[in-house]
Image: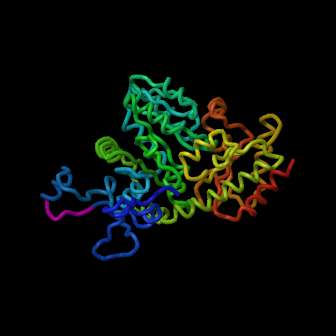
Amino acid sequence: MVGKRDDRSGADPVPGFDTLAVRGGVERTHYLEHSEPIFLTSSFVFENAAQAAARFAGDEPGYVYSRASNPTVTAFQDRLAALEGAEACVATASGMAAIMATVMSLTASGSHVVAARELFGATLQMFKILERFGVAVDYVKVTDTAQWRSALRPETKLCYLESPSNPLTEIADLAAIGAITREVGVQLVVDNCLSTPALQRPLALGADIVVHSATKYLDGQGRVLGGAVLGARKFIDETLVPFVRATGPTLSAFNAWVLLKGTETLGLRMERQCANALALARWLEAHPAVERVLYPGLESHPQHRLAMAQQSAGGAVIAFEVRGGDEQTRRRRAWQVIDNCRLLSITANLGDVKTTITHPASTTHARVGPEARLAAGIGEGLLRVAVGVEEVADLSADLARGLGVG
């Protein structure tokens, strides 16, 4: 997993990743509790009127109202910032809230955005909504660095991508794209949901801003919604915080506490889930009913070498296509695989310790339309499996039932 100690003589050692995941970001109260407290309060009281005025004016640090900040949320933000190697973090109510807050805080009518075609369906829909407010969006192939450069305009404010992408696990060259965006002063925003900082740190590879759906692997149990934005303190404090404070896509204290608990086992879970995913991907690749498997940890993946240079493992998401026939036949066969599963959970969420399976063309990407799906390479025979921590033999046996039908 990502995260190494600083062994320079004379300096305090930097805690390793798993240590930060368990202990980072937490300050004990005067009660000296061992587990992190939950501050379930909407507001905070002041010692006197002068202190209230000073805190509202920003002249004195402290908590005012949980829409703006909350100690439990701060603990989660500080821990995730430590794990990502970021200067600062703002947590939000969901992953989509994190993306929305980032993009809207950086753009205005007349701005231009360059985005990858290969994005999560709801993200593509959000960019379409953004166009209604006068923000132009151009889409490029996430793996084609030359397209990123040629799409830039004087009014471009940000470039947005996922790496690995959902669901096709395509890998962007973050260092190359980051060099292009830095050259022209454009912010590179990377969705690090599928890798998490346990496998990849985009800020160290060339990104300016990282976004997360904390709902996924950061929680790891499918319990709560959450999101996060990480980057330089100047951007967070001066650009993002005023937007979030005024518009209110705030993470609740309870959800922040659950996410703090989730991060404690992030490294352990990702290690097991990645190992399971690689074994299952190899089994699928050898199955006669499977046309192709897309998993960055496989040598057959088009960007395998790049993925292994940027990530410490291949991740826990596998995309595969059933073999043969026209699109209608492929959909029927893909649905047969899903319907014959008895162990895998049929749900569009991912990141759980429980393995999930979904048909992206009819679920996560159904609303983007057939043309957008075609451009993104999402056909009717494509299935996405987000691998959990169960026994691989049980997962392959479950999939074998559906792959052996028809």
Type of secondary structure dominating the magenta stretch: loop
**Residue drawn where x is 42% and y is 29% of the image:** 133
**Residue drawn where x is 67% and y is 37% of the image:** 378
Q: In this orientation, which residue lies closer to the viewer: 13 or 146?
A: 13
In percent of width and height, residue 78 lies at 37, 57
In percent of width and height, residue 74 lies at 35, 58
Is residue 48 in the magenta section?
yes
136 lies above or below 404:
above
In percent of width and height, residue 398 lies at 77, 59
Q: In this orientation, which residue lies closer to the viewer: 40 or 269?
A: 269
75 lies above or below 281:
below
Q: Picture quarter containing residue 375?
A: top right
In percent of width and height, residue 406 lies at 87, 47
Q: In this orientation, which residue lies closer to the viewer: 131 or 162?
A: 162
Q: Is residue 174 left or right of residue 281?
A: left
Q: Picture quarter containing residue 21?
A: bottom left
Q: In this orientation, which residue lies closer to the viewer: 232 or 2?
A: 2
Point out the stretch of residues depicted in magenta: 44-49
Is residue 382 in the magenta section?
no
